[in-house]
Image (cartoon, grey):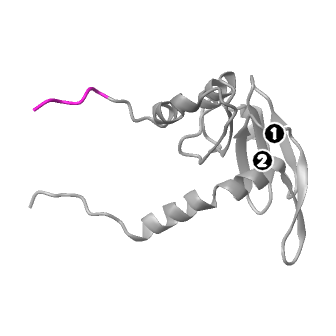
Amino acid sequence: MAREPNICNSPFAVCQRLTGPDLGRGYCLFVDNYSRAPALCDLLAANNTMCVGTVRQNRCHLPKDLMDQSLQTGQMDYRRPNQVLAIKWKDKREGQILRTKHLPNMREDATRTERKSKPDAVGDYTTHMPGIDFSDQIVSYNPFHHKTVE
């Protein structure tokens, strides 16, 4: 039986394989925090492919002074290491986002009861990611069973 060659399934390698044919064509990639790394953003930006996505606060290679900073509700701060813009903002909770597409601008979003200021990248992310988040939610309701030896 022939064995498949060793394929790296790290989030960075998977994103590279999936975007390979479309690199340099001016697309924008929206990703969740699982596959988000500053090195991936740098690689995509160098190949004319923009990216936007949330990132975990404890991710390595993020600006430490920004991630350790405490913000008040409605505040935003950012740093630009290389071509990547790292943003931290606070609404109900603190959130972090990496992007190569937007400038660090705020925009007003209206809900049924109030108006809130959010970074442009957050608005675009929430517009383009609901299908993925809904898919993840549905999968979580139906866990698959692993084969076990009894």
Who's the residue at 85% across and 47% down the image?
A: 76
Who's the residue at 71% across and 52% down the image?
A: 125
Mark 2 crowdedness (10 Å alpha carbons): few <14, some 14-19, many ≥20: many
Give the residue pinned by disc 2.
121
Instruction: State the extent of the magenta-drawn residues as a range.
Output: 1-6
* Disc nearer the start of the sequence (2/1): 1
- Seen as rendered, the residue at the extreme bottom is 113
Find residue 19 and report its image quarter. Answer: top right
Q: Nearer the viewer, residue 127 or 119?
A: 127
| 110 up-or-down from 24: above or below | below
Q: Secondary structure at mark 2?
A: helix
| 44 up-or-down from 87: above or below | above
Indicate the quadrant containing the C terminus: top left, top right, bottom left or bottom right: bottom left
| Numbered tag placed on residue 52 in the rendering | none
Tag 1: amino acid: His
Within the magenta stretch, is there residue 12?
Answer: no
Secondary structure that dominates the magenta span:
loop
Q: Are marks 2 and 1 in contact (CB under 8 Å)?
A: yes
| 74 up-or-down from 83: above or below | below
Within the magenta stretch, is there residue 5?
Answer: yes
Q: Secondary structure at mark 1?
A: loop
Tag 2: amino acid: Ala
| Numbered tag placed on residue 102 in the rendering | 1
- Real-space Cα distance between discs 2 and 1? 6 Å
Q: Nearer the viewer, residue 150 or 123?
A: 123
